[in-house]
Image (tube, grey):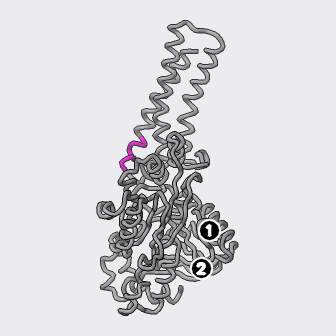
Amino acid sequence: MEKANIIAAWIAILVGFFAGVIPGLFFHDEEWMGGYSSWPRRLMRLGHVSFFGIAFVNLAFAFTVSHLNLTGDLVKTSSVLFIVAQIAMPTICYGASVKKVLRPRAQPYYWRIGTFSRHLSRTKSLKIALISMNGIRANDKELLRLGLNLPGFVERSRAIASLPSLGLLTLGALTPAEHQQTYLEVPDINELDQLPTGYDLAAISCFSAQIEEAYQLADRLRAAGTKVVMGGNHVSSETEEALTHADCVMIGEGELFWATMLADCQRGELKETYGSMFGNFNLEDAPLPAYGLLEPAKYNRVTLQTSRGCPMRCEFCASSVLYTRRYKQKPKELVLAEIHQLKALFPRPFIEFVDDNTFVDRRYWKTLLPELAEEQVRWFAETDVSVADDPEMLEAMKLAGCKQVLIGFESPVEEGLNGLELNSNWKAKRWKKYKHAIQRI
């Protein structure tokens, strides 16, 4: 039997060599298979290592048995099991890297590791404040007094100011149940009656336009003894600035390191920064946002995300293209699950799809829209003007409950659009079709 183990080991070593060389041709591409830290890439690396690791186990077994002259059914059974493992583990790992159905689904990898470390540390649970400061400055009384009151602009600014922070609700869903968390909104620090107190950790999310107010709030919370962590586009880009006001800055997509940050905070080992730009979180692993933290009566609109990124590169864009270099779509099953959760909490939810460019993947939406129509919800989306090129799509959107679309035209004159989109000057090329597109939509 030992000869079979030796043969299996050498075959595995040869196969492992080629199984590493071929994918290695693509590993330099940060976006390949979802990025270096994605599930598929991790599983592929594990499968590659297992070729060699189990091969050495088979070799060690074969030579040990022959030198010690061991015999019997136990040796035969062990020989067979080692050969089966040699075949099974690499096959399962490589299969799971390309087939989601083969992957564990109960909890993401990064969450399980964080939970395990917390159990080891035996530290107390945290009281966490999730603080949104996402009111838009177009709703600022002083700006309105100066004349920022174009038709529709003021109404839209108020709608944005009243939206809950989807980022914080998503992190809330990734927070283990051992912690106590509260969702708070501070649209204007000057109107804050009382500083939130009694919290071990405050996570603050805000836009650049409110960053100074966010820093003021962070300074006051820290002075009161609360640890402060900040996240979002602004602090991800201006990390050193933010660290003068916060104990910790989360850079990029927070889902990748939220659990680790909480575990460190419990142990009193909070680092100054977590994450990096372009971390490439896989939306297949996205949790259902913790909408249950909200008071439904306070909101006439709620947020939901179906994608991140955009294939275009507009020079002014400051949305999730700062976090990911590729466009990625959330599985429609997860989108529908979030809608079902919203319908259970809100009597007649008006949903804002907070994607950078919602209808990039037309095939995806043409399968989702009929199912969305059955949910009988009203919704809003942000898109580009090319949606007007597809009358069938527009009709399906209407039947599915679409009430508003926000399209960035940027300029009514061609000169103002030239060079605005950096990949192919796409915006300028569409200018002549603006009027027709608006009429059709």
Question: In the image, is residue 25 part of the stretch drawn in magenta?
Answer: yes
Q: Is residue 359 visible?
A: no
Q: Which residues are magenta?
A: 22-29
**Cα gap from disc 1 to disc 2, whole angstroms:** 24 Å
Vertically, is 18 above or below 439? Answer: above
Q: Secondary structure at mark 1?
A: helix
Residue at x-position 34% and y-position 74%: 316
Mark seen at residue 300: 2
Q: Nearer the viewer, residue 203 or 33?
A: 203
Q: Position of residue 150 (x, y in %)?
A: 42, 92
Task: Tell me the residue that label 1 is attached to.
Answer: 368
Q: Is residue 187 above or below residue 341?
A: below
Q: Is residue 9 visible to us here?
A: yes
Q: Is residue 9 magenta?
A: no
Q: Disc 1 vs disc 2: Cβ atoms closer than 8 Å?
A: no
Horizontal relation, residue 149 to residue 303: left or right = left
Name the residue type under label 2. Answer: Asn
Of the numbered discs 1 and 2, the one sitting upstream in the chain is 2
Say which quarter of the image contains residue 417.
bottom left
Q: Secondary structure at mark 2?
A: loop
Looking at the picture, tell me which residue is in the foreground, 176 or 128. Answer: 128
Q: Residues within 10 Å of mark 2 (few under 14, many from 20)?
A: some
The x and y percentages for residue 160 are 49, 79
Q: Is residue 44 left or right of residue 422?
A: right
Q: Quadrant of the N terminus?
A: top right
Residue at 65% x, 71% y: name it.
Answer: 372
Q: Nearer the viewer, residue 82 or 201?
A: 201
- Label 1 amino acid? Leu
